[in-house]
Image: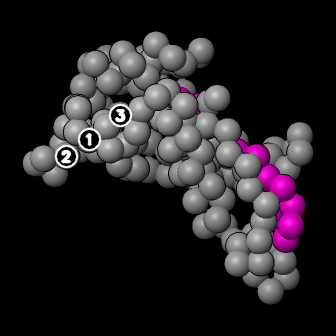
C-alpha cells in the first residue's frame, strides 16, 4: 500500500561511473505516485473519465541525500501530504534498504480532461483521496 515500488538499478539507469541519473529518481517517484493511485482502487484513466480531471505536475523538487549505484535495490514510497481544490502535494521517499537517498516532492494541479484547462480538483476526488490517507493537511 501507499505507493510502494521496488526497482533494481539497471545499466540503462546509470552513467559511465555506475551512478543513477537524477532523472531516474523522478521517474521512480512518478511510478510510485501511480502505484499510490492504483492502491486506492483507482487509475488515472478512471479519474479522467469519471471526474473530468487530469492530475498534472505543476512543480517538482528533489533532494538527493545519497547516490544509487548499478544493481542496488531501491524502494520508493509515496504519500499524499496536502490536498485542496487548488492543488495536491505528493512526497516520495526513495530508499536503499533503510537509508533514505532521495526525496521528491510534486505539486499537482487539476486540468479538465475535456477542456484541457486548469480546473479545481473535484470535491468527490478530494474526499476519495483524503479519506484513505492516514495523515495530511487539507486546506480549502
Residue 82, percent from left and from top: 48, 26
Other residues around mark 1 within 10 Å, as few (<14) / some (14–19) / many (≥20) = some
Other residues around mark 2 within 10 Å, as few (<14) / some (14–19) / many (≥20) = some
Residue 97, percent from left and from top: 89, 45
Q: Do residues under tags 2 and 1 come within 8 Å of each other at their CB atoms?
A: yes
Distance CA(mark 2)–CA(mark 3): 16 Å
Tell me if I can see residue 67 in this picture: no
Other residues around mark 3 within 10 Å, as few (<14) / some (14–19) / many (≥20) = some
Residue 107, percent from left and from top: 44, 42
Distance CA(mark 3)–CA(mark 1): 16 Å
Q: Nearer the viewer, residue 82 or 44?
A: 44
Tell me if I can see residue 5 in this picture: yes
Give the mark, 2 or 1, whose residue is nearer the N terminus.
1
Rendering quarter of residue 45:
top left
Q: Which residues are magenta?
A: 68-80
For numbered disc 1, what is the local secondary structure? helix
Amino acid at each position: 500500500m501507499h505507493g510502494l515500488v521496488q526497482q533494481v538499478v539497471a545499466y540503462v539507469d546509470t552513467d559511465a561511473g555506475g551512478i543513477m541519473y537524477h532523472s531516474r529518481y523522478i521517474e521512480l517517484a512518478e511510478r510510485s505516485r501511480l502505484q499510490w493511485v492504483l492502491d486506492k482502487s483507482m487509475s488515472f484513466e478512471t479519474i479522467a473519465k469519471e471526474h473530468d480531471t487530469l492530475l498534472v505536475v505543476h512543480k517538482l523538487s528533489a533532494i538527493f541525500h545519497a547516490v544509487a549505484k548499478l544493481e542496488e535495490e531501491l524502494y520508493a514510497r509515496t504519500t499524499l501530504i496536502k490536498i485542496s481544490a487548488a492543488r495536491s502535494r505528493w512526497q516520495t521517499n526513495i530508499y536503499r534498504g533503510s537509508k533514505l537517498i532521495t526525496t521528491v516532492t510534486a505539486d499537482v494541479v487539476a486540468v479538465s480532461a475535456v477542456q484541457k484547462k486548469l480546473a479545481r480538483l473535484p470535491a468527490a476526488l478530494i474526499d476519495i483521496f483524503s479519506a484513505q490517507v492516514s495523515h495530511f493537511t487539507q486546506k480549502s
